[in-house]
Image (cartoon, helix red, strand yellow):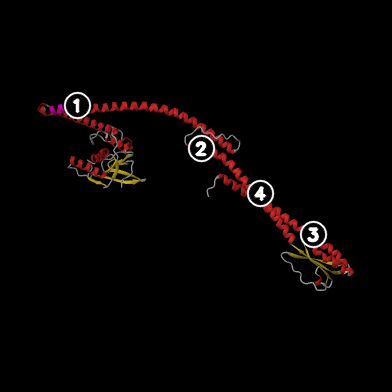
């Protein structure tokens, strides 16, 4: 049962006071009952002693008529039902019931409401007889009931007062606490001006004062935060304008690279080709070698421009989030590689059914770089093998592109994704050093991560996630 605090307090007070009152009443009523019992027993003993003195004289003088009248009058006294006087032969010589005179005393039997009290009558000469008086316990019962009823009335009155006090105390306590709760709810809704105004020195007052202090601190900090946010918004607007200007400059720079630099490179490459073709007979081997180096450098520069433009496009491209079959994209990339180098024999395993969420074009670029690197770095490896698959790690799907090619030294793994950083000599494996930077940017833009492991001469593996759950 979910009771409010005020009822819990009232019940706790009621039970505690009820236990204490029960103990006090039990002790008090016990003493009252004990004293009443003693008083009744003492009154019975007094009655018995008085009659015994009169009866002793009557037995000694054998004056039974005198005592008979007195014994007959005893039942008129409160609590006395019957009386008998017996001589030394246990013959009834006086009784409150005349029909018992001259008979032998029957067995005395007590009941729930009556009891006999007997007094032996003696003098110096010996036993004279005995006096038996039957007392009623109704007086004692009535006294006990009166005491019990008085105790019940006191208990009921006390319990009622305790219940009212408990409820009142609980209400007064929870009423003040409720003010704190209501104020807290208003603060939670954004009203930081609310105060409890509880100023008493007790614990609840201290809670209210602490709450008011907290609300004031929060309100002050909110005002300060609002000023900071206003300043921050202005700074964000300024930085946004600066970023837009920088993007425009970046786009202009990319345009310049794409158009202004390509034209000179085409001229250099074209004139070098003309010299090679038209003046071949006039050039020695050294000159032809120089022309070939000029053409290769121009081609490398063109490839570098292409890679920079690709990286620029990826940074600015909008992500199209769709579900597609990444395994099929891998098959297509591999087919293109085989078409460019039909003489190469490379064993390639692609896990089927790898369905992902993301931008198909950007992820294709990333896979083209990763699979292309694996294809390139297994170029000098007999029995070359490339494997593309996925696995679950900590409830997240990780995609893996691994090969048994040249590998790399893990000491330089932190340079893998830095633009223009190469871990192999160019004469061994060609490239611009931008491919893995492009892959990393694509993966990051999909909310994923990428890392690489390798060992020299034993291949490399690249692990990446796409920041989304695998589509069934």
Q: Earlier in the sequence, mark 4 or mark 3?
A: 3
- The numbered disc on residue 43 is 3
- The residue tagged with tag 2: helix, strand or loop? helix
Q: CA distance from mark 4 to mark 2?
A: 38 Å
Left or right, 234 with reference to 406: right
List the residue tagged with mark 2: 184
Q: Is residue 61 magenta?
A: no
Q: Magenta stretch: give its range.
A: 265-274
Q: CA distance from mark 1 to mark 3?
A: 139 Å
- Tag in front: 1 or 2: 2
Left or right, 240 with reference to 348: right
Q: Earlier in the sequence, mark 4 or mark 2?
A: 4
Which residue: 20% across, 44% down?
345
Q: Earlier in the sequence, mark 3 or mark 2?
A: 3
Q: Nearer the viewer, residue 403 or 53?
A: 53
Q: Is most of the magenta stretch helix, strand or loop?
A: helix
Q: CA distance from mark 3 to mark 2?
A: 72 Å
- The residue tagged with tag 3: helix, strand or loop? helix
Q: Nearer the viewer, residue 213 or 155?
A: 155
List the residue tagged with mark 4: 158
Percent x, y for residue 226?
Answer: 44, 29
Percent x, y for residue 185?
Answer: 50, 38
List the residue tagged with mark 1: 263
- The residue tagged with tag 1: helix, strand or loop? helix
- Tag in front: 3 or 2: 3
- Tag in front: 1 or 4: 4
Q: Is residue 43 visible?
A: yes
């Amino acid at each position: 049962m979910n009771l409010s605090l005020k009822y819990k307090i009232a019940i706790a007070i009621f039970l505690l006071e009820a236990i204490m009152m029960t103990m006090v009443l039990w002790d008090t009523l016990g003493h009252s009952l004990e004293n009443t019992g003693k008083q009744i027993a003492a009154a019975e003993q007094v009655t018995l002693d008085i009659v015994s003195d009169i009866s002793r004289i009557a037995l000694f003088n054998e004056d039974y008529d005198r005592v008979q009248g007195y014994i007959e009058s005893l039942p008129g006294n409160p609590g006395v039902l019957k009386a008998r006087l017996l001589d030394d032969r246990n013959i009834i010589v006086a009784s409150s019931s005349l029909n018992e005179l001259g008979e032998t005393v029957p067995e005395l039997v007590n009941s729930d409401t009556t009891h006999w009290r007997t007094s032996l009558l003696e003098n110096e000469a010996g036993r004279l007889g005995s006096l038996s008086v039957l007392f009623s316990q109704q007086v004692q019962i009535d006294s006990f009931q009166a005491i019990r009823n008085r105790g019940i009335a006191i208990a009921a009155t006390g319990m009622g007062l305790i219940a009212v006090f408990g409820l009142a105390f609980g209400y007064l306590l929870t009423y003040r606490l409720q003010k704190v709760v209501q104020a807290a709810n208003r603060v939670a809704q954004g009203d930081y001006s609310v105060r409890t105004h509880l100023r008493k020195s007790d614990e609840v007052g201290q809670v209210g004062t602490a709450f008011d202090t907290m609300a004031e601190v929060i309100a002050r900090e909110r005002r300060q935060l609002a000023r900071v946010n206003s300043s921050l918004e202005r700074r964000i607007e300024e930085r946004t304008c600066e970023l837009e200007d920088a993007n425009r400059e970046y786009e202009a720079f990319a345009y310049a690279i794409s158009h202004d630099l390509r034209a000179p490179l085409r001229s250099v490459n074209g004139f070098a080709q003309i010299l090679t073709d038209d003046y071949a007979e006039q050039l020695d081997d050294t000159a032809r070698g120089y022309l070939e180096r000029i053409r290769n450098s121009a081609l490398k520069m063109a490839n570098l421009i292409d890679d920079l433009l690709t990286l620029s496009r990826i940074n600015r491209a909008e992500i199209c989030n769709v579900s597609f079959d990444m395994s099929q994209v891998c098959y297509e990339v591999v087919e293109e590689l085989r078409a460019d180098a039909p003489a190469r024999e490379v064993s390639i395993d692609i896990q089927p059914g790898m369905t992902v969420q993301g931008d198909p074009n950007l992820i294709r670029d990333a896979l083209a770089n990763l699979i292309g690197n694996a294809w390139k770095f297994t170029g000098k490896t007999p029995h070359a093998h490339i494997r593309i698959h996925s696995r679950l790690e900590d409830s997240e799907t990780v995609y893996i592109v691994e090969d048994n090619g040249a590998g790399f030294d893990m000491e330089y793994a932190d340079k893998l994704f830095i633009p223009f950083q190469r871990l192999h000599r160019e004469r061994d494996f060609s490239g611009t050093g931008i491919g893995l930077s492009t892959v990393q940017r694509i993966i990051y833009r999909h909310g994923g991560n990428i890392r690489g492991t390798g060992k020299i001469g034993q291949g490399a593996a690249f692990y990446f996630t796409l920041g989304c759950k695998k589509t069934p």
